[in-house]
Amino acid sequence: MKNQLLITTAILIALNGISCKQQGSTTSIIGQGDGPTAIYIDEQPDFLLRKGLDLIHEMHDLANDSNYIKYVTTHTEITQRVREFASGNYQSDYKVFAIDNLKPFTDYLTRMAPGLDSKLYERLYRSIPALINAQSGSTAIAATSLLTGEDVFHSNQPEAPCIYLYSFNKGINCLVLFIPQSEKIVQAYASWIINRQLGQVKNADDVKTFFRTVLNIPDIAIEQLK
């Protein structure tokens, strides 16, 4: 009952506050301009993967900013969680998994909050990290909410909302959501994930089992990118 209340709260917070497989390198023009007024994009196959890492590194810097942490919380358990994020190595030895079809998540989220307008799907997607962290308690939600990351950039990819899950050593994980908008604009949202079941992730099957067990979402297609 307690977890159910936390999950419902996580959705409400999110409401108030997808092919994603990467193809070969592409170049495109944004807008109607040409020549000196055009904006060109030259993308590599791992463009989104690197964008997600950039956000994670920014959140890592935030976790190491003692002035910021002192300003936002004095709670011992929360600061302990923050120190765990701050101590991680996010430069090498990690795995990345892509989920390029979020329909199973949409089905689950609309069951949790039926009757919502389809325009709110983006906010529902953004509630996924909080839904997972809620199962680890209110401290997990509080700690991860202090260290989120966001970015907006131009890109040909993805064509639909998708999720990248980054799995690092010490059982530290991060979820990055990419949502394409009009004019080739992409919004990215990153959040730390706290859940013991993600501590032993080795392959795509482990990730699939995690989402089936934790959020009761079956039949999702997962690709290991790294």
Image (cartoon, helix red, strand yellow):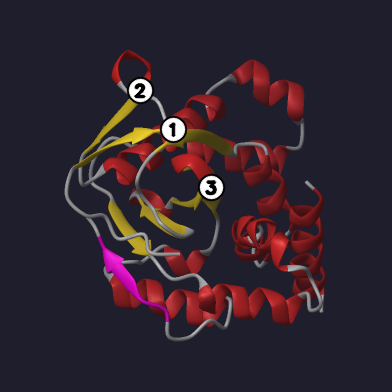
Is 86 or 129 nearer to us in this picture?
129
The amino acid pointed to by label 1 is Gly
Residue 48 drawn at (x, y percent): 34, 45
Determine the secondary structure under disc 3.
loop
Query: Bounds of the magenta span?
Result: 220-224
Horizontally, residue 214 falls left or right of residue 146, namely left
Instruction: Kindly identify which residue carries mark 3.
Output: 181
The amino acid pointed to by label 2 is Ala
Residue 222 drawn at (x, y percent): 34, 71
Looking at marks 3 and 1 on the same chain, the residue that comes earlier in the sequence is marked by: 1
Is 94 or 179 nearer to us in this picture?
179
Query: Quick one: label 1, few (<14), some, or many (20+) residues within 10 Å?
Result: few
Q: Reply above or below: 214 against 150.
A: below
Residue 174 drawn at (x, y percent): 46, 50
Cα distance in 3D space between marks 1 and 2: 7 Å
Instruction: Kindly identify which residue carries mark 1.
Output: 31
Name which residue lies at 52% across and 34% down.
151
- Residue 186 visible in rendering: no
Cα distance in 3D space between marks 3 and 1: 13 Å
Instruction: Kindly identify which residue carries mark 2.
Output: 38
Quarter placement of the N terminus: bottom right
